């Protein structure tokens, strides 16, 4: 058992990729601030914006996850989300992608995963 318990932490290819690109952008912008290089600051901030775009596109391609817990068989970060093509119910990213994707996302269509009860005294 991990330090976080037996729960779905949501590790996905989209999440890890976006986090890595954003970290590089922030580090680049921070180095540019130390060097007082204004174009470098803007480039670093542009990379941070690019991280959001890359994460969103990977989510739409099925490398993210829907909101809420997933079944335990889908907890591995390399598992692709098969319901991403139709869109996720109550997902802002899917709604922004267009009306066709938002219409395909029917509320309540997602299967729910049972979460373990909280341990008492923890």
Image: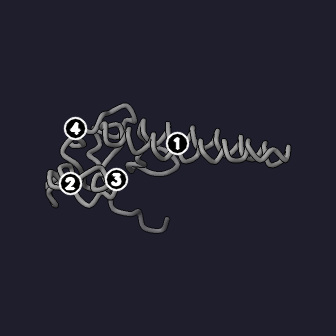
Viewed as shown, does residue 110 lie left or right of 12? left
Dot 4 or dot 2: first in sequence order is: 4
Q: Mark 4 points at which residue?
A: 82
Camera-side residue of 96 and 3: 96
Camera-side residue of 18 and 95: 95
Callout 3 secondary element: helix
Mark in the foreground, 4 or 1? 1
Mark 3 burial class by Cα count in 10 Å: few <14, some 14-19, many 20+: some
Residue 115 makes an appearance in the image:
no
Q: Position of residue 122 (x, y in %)?
A: 49, 64
Contact between marks 3 and 4 (CB within 8 A): the answer is no
Callout 2 secondary element: helix
Q: Mark 2 points at which residue?
A: 99
Q: Name the residue under label 1.
A: 50
In the displayed structure, 59 sits above or below 110; it is: above
* Disc 1 from disc 2: Cα separation: 23 Å
Q: Name the residue under label 3.
A: 93
* Disc 2 from disc 3: Cα separation: 11 Å
């Amino acid at each position: 058992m991990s330090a976080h318990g037996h729960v779905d932490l949501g590790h996905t290819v989209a999440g890890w990729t976006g986090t890595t690109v954003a970290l590089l952008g922030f580090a680049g912008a921070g180095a540019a601030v130390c060097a007082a290089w204004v174009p470098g600051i803007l480039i670093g901030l542009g990379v941070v914006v690019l991280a959001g775009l890359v994460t969103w596109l990977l989510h739409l391609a099925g490398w993210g996850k829907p909101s809420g817990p997933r079944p335990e068989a889908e907890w591995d970060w390399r598992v692709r989300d098969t319901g991403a093509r139709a869109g996720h119910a109550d997902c802002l990213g899917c709604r922004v992608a267009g009306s066709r994707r938002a219409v395909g996302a029917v509320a309540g269509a997602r299967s729910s995963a049972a979460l373990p009860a909280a341990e008492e005294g923890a």
